[in-house]
Every structure is written in structure tokens, then in C-alpha cells.
Image: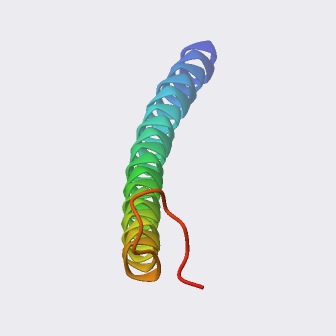
Amino acid sequence: MKKLFVSFAALALVFSIYSCRETTEEKAEDAVEAAAQDTENNLEAAGDAAENAANEAGEEINEEINDTDDVNGEDDV
């Protein structure tokens, strides 16, 4: 009976360690996927912000060029 109990305890220990290992691997995989998705989203947002800033700067430059005729930047009055 003692051998049966020790064998069962050893089997339970092996099973619990094996189960935890799989869960840890899955959690690590999920964390990597989430980090990759966050990085992708942040890069897209940064690209959009840079594009918007460039467009706004271009519009301001065009307005400045079209609204002034003097080298000193004085407006047409």
C-alpha cells in the first residue's frame, strides 16, 4: 500500500509540474503576442501623428508663402 501511495504522489507531482510548464509557455506566448500587437499599434499611431504633423506644417508653409509678398514676412494689407 505504501508503494502505491508513493507512486501516486510521484505521478501527481510529475503531472502538476508538467501542467504548470504548459501553462507558463502559453502565458509567455500570449504575452509576446500582446507585446507585438501593442508595438504594431503604437508604430501605426506614431506614423499617423508624424504624417499629420507634416501635413499641417506643409499647410502652414503654403499659407505663409501665399499670404505674404515681402521678404520680411509682412502681410498684405
Q: Does residue 22 lie above or below 60 as drawn? A: above
Q: Nearer the viewer, residue 11 or 56?
A: 56
Left or right of 26? Residue 77 is right
Quadrant containing the C terminus in the rendered view: bottom right
Q: Where is residue 55 in the image (x, y as percent from the top left)?
A: 38, 73
Residue at point 47% right, 63% down?
Answer: 49
Residue 27, position in %: x, y? 50, 44
The colour scheme of the drawn protein is rainbow
In the rendering, at what x and y percent does residue 47 appear? 37, 61
* Quarter of the image where one finds residue 65: bottom left
> In the rendered view of the protein, which quadrant contains the N terminus?
top right
Observer-nearest of 2 and 15? 15
Q: In this view, does 9 lie above or below 41?
A: above
Residues 70 and 45: in front is 70
- Which residue is at a point 49% across and 36% down the rendered structure image? 24
Residue 35 is situated, as x and y percent measured from the top left of the image, at: 45, 47
In the displayed structure, 73 sits above or below 39; it is below
User: At 40% from the left edge and 43% from the top edge, which residue is drawn?
Assistant: 32
- Residue sitting at x 47%, y 25%: 14
Q: Is residue 4 left or right of residue 53?
A: right
